[in-house]
Every structure is written in C-alpha cells, then in structure tokens.
Amino acid sequence: MIRYICKRFILLIPVIVGISFIIFAAMNLAQGDYVDSLDQDEMTAEQIAALRAEYGLDQPLLVRYVNYMWNMIRGDLGTSWATGQDIMDTFMQRLPNTIYLGIVASLIGTIVSIPLGIFAAQHRGGIMDNIANVVAVFGISVPNFWFGLMLMLLFSLKLGWLPSSGNATWLCVLMPAITIGTDKMADLTRTTRSTMLDTLTQDYLRTARAKGMPEKLVVNKHALKPAMIPILTVTMGQLSGAIAGAALTESVFSWPGVGILVVDAVKNRDVPMACGVLIIKCVLIGVIEMVTDLLYVAVDPRLRTHFAAEAGKRQPLWKEIVGDIRQAVRSVVTIPQRVRRALDENKANRALALREKEERKARAEAAKAARAARGKEKRVLVSKQYSKRSQLGEFWYRYRQNKGAVVALVILLLLALNCIFADVIFDYETQVTGYNLFEIYQKPNAKHWFGTDELGRDLFARVMYGARYSLSIGLATVALAMVVGLPVGAMCGYFGGKIDLYVSRILDIIGSIPGLLMGILVVSALGQSTSSLIIAMAVSRVVGVSRGARAAVLTAKNNEYVEAAKAIGMPTASIIARHVVPNCLSPIIVRTTLQVAGAIVSASSLSYLGLGVPIPSPEWGALLAAGRSVIREYPHLTTFPGLAIMITVLAFNMMGDGLRDALDPKLKK
C-alpha cells in the first residue's frame, strides 16, 4: 500500500506542472497583466517599468515559469501581488471554512440521498421511486447560485431566521451547505438507486431471502456493502469538489473560502496567488483520491484479496520507476520507426481494400445480370396489420412513452420558435435595450407581465429575448466540444496503447482545473465576448466528451463487424468513421443533451460573475446579477430569470432521459 501511495504522489507531479503552466500561459495571453490593471494615472513610465521589474513581468514567460517552479520546490509559494500576504498563510486561513462547508454539505446530501436511493431501488416504479426521480431532476436542473439567492430571500430577508452572509455563527453555514448539498444530492441519489438495482437482483441475495433472513438485514448487510464503491466514488468526489471551492456559492453568501479566492486572483491577474492555491488544491485532491482508494479496499474484501495476492509479485519501487522512465525514453526514440511502419501498413491496407472493392463490384454486376436473366422475383405482400414499425417510428413510439420527455420536447420547441421569431415578437431597441425612466422598478402587472428593471425595461421581453443567447451559447458550446472531443476520444479508445496514455494524461491535467476557473482563464485571455464565452466553456467540456466517446468506442471496437472490416482491409479511418462511431452514438446523443443543460448553467454562472455576454445583452445570468442588489425590494428581478434557466435546463435533462430510454437496447422489450 505504501508503494501505491508513493506512485500516486509521483503521478501528481506532471499534473502540477501542467496546471501551473496553463495558468502562466493563459495569464500571459490575457489582455494586460497585473501592472496594467493598476491605476496608472499618477505613475511615470519609470515607475511602471520598475513595477514590472519587481514582479518579473519584464522577463520571458518561460523564465518566469522556471523561477516560480524552482521557488515552489524549495517550499516558497511567494506572496500575493494584490494583497502582499503570504500565499500559504492566506490559503490555510480559508481552508478550514471550505472544509467545514464541504463536510456539512456532503452530510446533508448523503443523509438524504443514500436512504432515498435505496428505497427507490426497493420500490421501483412506486411512490419513493418517483420522489427520488423528482429530487434528482430538480437537483441537476436548478442553478445553485440562483437557488442560494432564493434561500436567502426566503429564510433571511423575508422570515429573518438565518443570517444572509458571513461565517460568524454556525447558522451561517446552513444555507450555503443546503445550496451545495442539493446540487450534489441528485448525482448521489441516481448513483445509489442504479447501483442498488443491479445488486438487489444478485443470486446471493435471493439465497439469503430463501433462508428467511429479514429484508432489512438483507439490504443493510449483504446488498449495501457491494454497492458502496460507486457511492463512495460520488461522495468523495463531492468532497473534492468542495476542496476545489464552490466559488459561486461563496460569492452569493460572502463565505470566506478558497473558491472565491482563486476567482478573485485570476480576475486581478494575481499569478502567484492563482498558481499557488491551485497547486495546493491539486495536492489535497490527490490525497482525497488516495483515501478513496483505501476505502475501496476496506469496503470490498475482493480488493483486499487482490492486493494481498499482488504484494508478493512486485518489484522494488525504484525498479518500477526506472523501468517506467526507460520505457518512456524508448517510446520517444522509436517514434520515427513506428510512424514509418504505420505508413507502410496503411499503404498495404489501402491497396488490399482497393482490390477487394473491385472484386465486390465485379461480383455485384454478375449477380445483377443473373437476376435480370431470371426475371423479376415475385414480391410477397405483407399485411399492414403485421408490418413492423420503421426504425424512426420505433424510436418515436418508445420516446413518447415517457410523458415528461414529450412535455420537455414541446417546451424546447416553443423556446426554439421564440428564439427564431424574437425580433418579430419584441422590439429590441425599445423593449430589450432601451429605457423608460417613468416605469422603473414596476412589479408584475397586466402591462408588464414580469415587471420592469432599474431602467424601466420590460423584464418579460428581456427574459424571452435572453433565451436566444442562452440556447445558442449552449448548443454552440456542445457542438464545438463534440467536434474536438469526439475524434480525440474515438482515437484513444480505438488505438489504445501509448496514444491513449499520453492523451489521457493531457486530458487529466485539463480536467484538474475547475470548469468555472477554466472559463475565467479563457475569457481573460481572449477578452469578454460571446465567442470567447463559447470557447471558454467548450474547453472544459472537451474532457468529458472525449472520455465518454473513449468509453463507448472501447465497447464497440471488439464487435464482430469491426473485425470483419479489418479482415477485408478497410482503412482504419473508415472503420472508425463508418462502423465504430455510428454504433456509439446512442450514449453520445444522450450525453450531448445533458451537456447542453450544463453549458447553459455555466454560461449563466460566468455572466453572473460579470465575465459572460457583455452588457446590455439580456443573458439570463447577467439579469440575475443585476437584480441581486435589490432582491429584498424587487425579488421579481431575480425570480423570473432563474425560473427561465431552471425550466430550460429541466427540459433538456428530461429530454435526455427520454432519449436514453428510447435508445437503450435493454429497454426494447
């Protein structure tokens, strides 16, 4: 076990190097550095140059990066450019708050989700199952920052039961923890239900029931323990997410955690603070992952037996490390030979495929001539009563069995029509971006269904027009992620080996950076615009798309039709494009709908932080941010944009569930 822990720490080194370099590169590409963000009105050119020299900004990027990594190796993470405080001290002051919030949120989610998932699995199709589905769908559909605002409005501003911000008393943690716990509750409930459904049908549980064992004991003693590995994975992943920092929740409730610390550092171009905090987070998350693996061994006796059997077969740790280094060097040295061999094989395969194609064409022409000589075959008319539905008809038949999915499809069609004809329905210059100071801050009425904002603009028109931004951003983000991630994942899954290893490590490095922070980095580098927002969200989603495509291709590439295509000499690219990827589209399509929902929430999150669609465009997240300061007096300014996000995301999630049921071959009977 000590050997395993040492290897995991060694594998953290390239991740730390990759994350720190991405931060350095992104901030170097940003429009302006830390000195440019300062007020330079009363500074001379000599003073500005001295500041750049003091912070090392006059040196090349690689020189600064090497100097920073050398100081980090010596244990010096430096001081913050913005505050002048020691980075390690600042992080350690805020870390207890983040861990406290994460533990309370995980407890809230676990206490509710695990029993609910177990009951749902035991009573499949019953009331508890329906409640679990409602909880799961609600949890993944509601934007957590908007949900936090609604909790603050109800329990703090209206009822006065709980404090609205800070961490002065233990009551301050309840609303942030409920906000985060509700977001994580959906995933854990679904995971528990799915795992228990598979476990409850096992033969050993049937044997235990046959012996007269009470059902409660069967579930708690025999069913729950084998199902704990995926549950532990999700639970510890939530704790890792808490360590990474819930920046939006911390921003809503002014909670002094590490999440908002990183966001502020990136926005202020504070490179030492951003890199230092992210590196510490990376180490802590690596420790949590190792603890998770140790818990696997403690829960599952099969893993304990496996580790005990493998213990006597291993070489000393230093020999394994030297062997890995030698293998990596050998793989780099032999790249030209392997490329030449692959080109020769591809050339031979193409020649063989061309000959096979000509032979097939000749056989087809001969068969066609023979049929023409014999005459037309008689057609057998099949009664319409017994005819089967077409493939598309079968898909639609199974899709419409899910009534919620049909309702979701209708909602999305109405939103699409609203986006297409928004310019016809609403006057952009007067209702959306104009102003009328005689009608400011009006509450919902017959003339203005959703009320008006601080400039007298009709909120209903702005919310409806904002659907054009949110839907187009979500769809464009997922389309860009699919264009990049699908070929990468298919290549890794089909070829495997070194290609899979190296590309997976790069994806792991990108995936180690929180999605919100990656979005802030990209927007800071490219500038604030709609196209920058799309690219920013697509970068973080390429990892998920690639991993999903890789998993699907790994399953499909061993099928007989793929082996047959290889046998006739079909080129590898044609095999992947014509045979492997089309047979993997079902899970990819389902995942795409869920990715669109996540992209809409992410776009709203960045706009809420002031880094999304530029003002005065009525994007839903920007509308929420504009109404937060007057939420006590005019709650309609935050209620309706948040409901629009929730309904749209809920529709995409429900449509994804319907597509999953319609495309899953296991549910055809």
Image: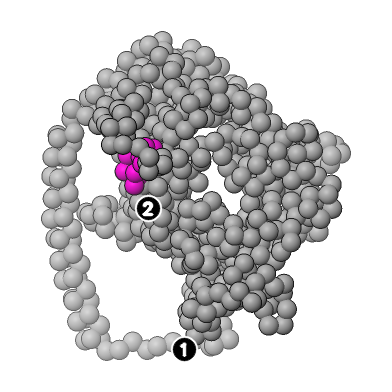
- Whether residue 340 is visible: yes
Q: Type of residue at label 1?
A: Leu
Please give the range of residues in magenta: 26-36
Q: Nearer the viewer, residue 19 or 357?
A: 19
- Whether residue 283 is visible: no
User: In the displayed structure, does residue 242 sit left or right of residue 9?
Assistant: right
Residue position marked by numbered label 2 in the rendering: 527
Query: The residue tagged with tag 2: helix, strand or loop?
Result: loop
Of the two numbered discs 1 and 2 on the same chain, state the one appearing first in sequence: 1
Task: Examine the structure image and report whether residue 84 is included in the region drawn in magenta.
Answer: no
Residue drawn 37% across the image and 89% down it = 378
Q: Nearer the viewer, residue 114 or 256?
A: 256
Q: Nearer the viewer, residue 406 or 300?
A: 406
Tell me where residue 127 appears, x and y as whole percent. 81, 59
Q: Quadrant of residue 666?
A: bottom right
Tell me where residue 223 appears, x and y as whole percent. 73, 38
- 3D distance between C-alphas at marks 1 and 2: 65 Å
Tell me where residue 545 appears, x and y as whole percent. 44, 51
- Image quarter where the C terminus lies is bottom right
Q: Nearer the viewer, mark 1 or mark 2?
A: 2
Q: Quadrant of residue 292?
A: top right
- Image quarter where the N terminus lies is top right
Q: Which mark is residue 381?
A: 1
Residue drawn 47% across the image and 17% down it = 6
User: In the displayed structure, does residue 178 sit left or right of residue 627?
Assistant: right
Q: Type of residue at label 2?
A: Gly
Query: The residue tagged with tag 1: helix, strand or loop?
Result: loop
Tell me where residue 440 appears, x and y as whole percent. 65, 72
Residue drawn 84% across the image and 41% down it = 215
Magenta: main secondary structure: loop
